[in-house]
């Protein structure tokens, strides 16, 4: 968990901070796994046409690589945009 998230927990006792940090870490892990599973499912459905071989055909492999690259770039861009919006959002004091 990064320091900016911990800064919002300053008023809490150490035990509560540790619990919150653990919960946030679990949520981040869950979200990462969800994103990975979504990537695999989407690229597989879009790119794999036949099951006649154990390995991917060259065109399928190329498609999967392009699909994964596009998905990750999009995800990074969305994350950056949310960070920008969050940074510019008014704070509640």
Image (spheres, rainbow, N blue to C red):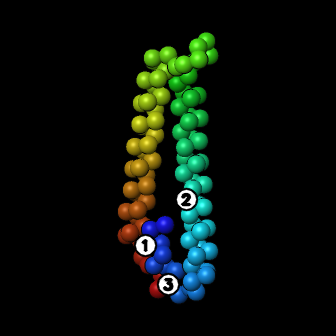
| Separation (CA) of disc 3 from disc 1 | 11 Å
Rendering coords of residue 70 (x, y %) = 42, 37
Give neighbour class at mark 3: few <14, some 14-19, many 20+ (Cα, 10 Å).
Answer: few
Residue farthest along the top direction in this orientation: 52
Q: How many marks?
A: 3
Give neighbour class at mark 2: few <14, some 14-19, many 20+ (Cα, 10 Å).
Answer: few
| Separation (CA) of disc 2 from disc 1 | 15 Å
Is residue 39 in view? yes
Q: Residue at x 58, y 48 (%)?
A: 33
Sooner in the amino-acid sequence: mark 2 or mark 1: 1
Q: Residue at x 56, y 29 (%)?
A: 44
Q: State the image quarter where residue 91 is shown.
A: bottom left
Say whether residue 13 is left or right of residue 5: right
Sooner in the amino-acid sequence: mark 3 or mark 1: 1
Please say if 26 is above or below 7. above
Rendering coords of residue 29 (x, y %) = 57, 56
| Separation (CA) of disc 2 from disc 3 | 20 Å
Is residue 50 in view? no
**Circle 3 — which element?**
loop
Numbered label attached to residue 28? 2
Numbered label attached to residue 10? 3
Q: State the image quarter where residue 19 is shown.
A: bottom right
Q: Which residue is mark 1?
A: 3
């Amino acid at each position: 968990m990064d320091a900016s998230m911990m800064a919002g927990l300053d008023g809490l006792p150490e035990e509560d901070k540790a619990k919150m940090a653990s919960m946030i870490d679990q949520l981040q892990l869950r979200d990462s796994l969800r994103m990975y599973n979504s990537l695999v499912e989407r690229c597989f459905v879009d790119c794999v046409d036949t099951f006649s071989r154990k390995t991917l055909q060259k065109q399928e492999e190329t498609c999967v690589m392009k699909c994964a690259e596009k998905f990750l770039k999009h995800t990074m861009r969305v994350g950056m945009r949310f960070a920008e919006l969050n940074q510019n959002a008014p704070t509640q004091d």
